[in-house]
Structures are given as C-alpha cells and as structure tokens.
Amino acid sequence: MFPSQLVNLNHMHIVGVIPARYKSSRFPGKPLADIAGKSLIQRVVEQCQQAAALEEVIVATDDARIADHVRPFCRVEMTSENHPSGTDRIAEVVAGLPSCDGAINIQGDEPMMDPAVINLVAKALEKAPMSTAATPIRDPEDYDNTNVNKVVLNQASQAIYFSRRTIPCVRESLDQPVARQLQAFPFLKHLGIYGYRKDTLAQLVQWPVSPLEKAEQL
C-alpha cells in the first residue's frame, strides 16, 4: 500500500516525461524514425505539449543521438544507461525536480496520444497516488495481439491486473467469434500512460521485480 501524501491539490506541479531509448531490441533507433517529415519522438512531444495539465515536457534518454535531436524543441535530461525500465528512468529525472509534485509517463512510441487523456490522468493524481487510462477493445485484431496490453478493473475503476493476454475468460462465449466475445464483456486495452505522485514513484522503483512483472514483461 502507498502512504497518503500531502500535496497542493489546488495546483499540482505535474511534468510529462517521455522515456526514449535508442537500443530497442525490436526496432533500434525507433524514436528517430521519420513519420511524415517529423521524427516519432517529436510527434510524441508535440502531443504532450498540447496538454494544459503539464507544466513542462521532458525527454529522458541515455543516448546522445536522441538528446541532440530533441534539444531544439524540448527539454532533455540524460539518464543512466542501467535503468531496467522507463519508470526507473523517469524516477531519476523527477528526483532532480524539487518543485515537482508528480509526473506523467508518456510512452515514446505513442504519437497519437490524445492531450485530453494526458489531462485526465494528471487530474486523477489529485485523489490517487497513481493513475492510468484505458479504452474498450473494439478491433477484433487487438483481442489476441500480445503487443496490445490489457487491463482489468474492479468495481471502483481501480486497475487490478495488466496482461498481454485478454482477460477475463468469458466462458459462455468461448465458442463464439471474437467480435461476439467483444460484445459479451467490456474488455479494456491500456493506453500506455501512467501518472505518479513524486513520493509514490520514488517508492515504486525501490521494489524488486515481481514474478508476474517478469513473466508479462510489463
């Protein structure tokens, strides 16, 4: 459990941090990939800069090529090469921001992230130590796609599990086409965004990797 934290709910200082690695095993140099005349990372930055809830947008990287590319249009913070996850990279950046109350982790490969979603995730930090966002799965191709991460909520809209598999199993619909299964239950896909209060983030990255985290690679 996270302890309750005292923050100024009238005006939380929230920053958006985009972790960006060059050495991706599946797509090396992905942040610098060209998308209709602009790099992938620039398009993500521009979406984040439209979110009114963010005081500042920062790219966190360990690669000089990404840093040199980003500096003309966004603040860059160089971070350790040894971080096991983007969350750890963000924690290093946030630890050096004395006035920061919280951070929004926006994935560096989400160029279509809606600024309104960023604002909602930031707003939720007024009442919770962490926040995130999900949307119903409507495309049957997403149902079995392990690159589309799924999330299960309880009745209080709290996330209780994230998985690369589609859960729960709706037993009565198992023999139905995927389109029918999607009608049988409100399956949700995660939107690749997290919000953290500063103290929560600092605590979170101290925990060891759990067997479930290791298994799902999430």
Image: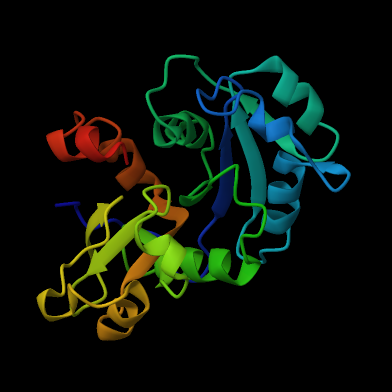
The quarter of the rendered structure image containing the C terminus is top left
Percent from the top left, x then y, of residue 18? 58, 41
Depth check, front residue: 188 or 53: 188
Residue 203 visible here: yes
- Is 43 above or below relative to 53? above
Q: Residue at x 67, y 66 (%)?
A: 52
Please, is residue 39 above or below residue 127 in the view?
A: above
Relative to the observer, which residue lies in front, 189 or 78? 189
Q: Quadrant of residue 113?
A: bottom right
- Which residue shows up at 19% across the image and 28% down it? 208
* Residue at image coords 33%, 78%: 182
Count the marks.
0
Give the quadrant of residue 76.
Answer: top right
Residue 137 percent coordinates (x, y):
41, 71
Colour scheme in use: rainbow
Residue drawn at (12%, 81%) of the image:
172
> In the figure, is residue 169 to the left or right of 85?
left
Task: Give the camera-side residue of 165 and 59.
Answer: 165
Up-down: is 126 above or below 109? below
Q: Residue furthest right?
A: 37
**Residue 177 drawn at (x, y percent):** 31, 75
Residue 125 visible in the shown view: no
Q: Is residue 176 above or below residue 191?
A: below
Q: Position of residue 135 (x, y in %)?
A: 43, 72
Q: Is residue 129 left or right of residue 113?
A: left
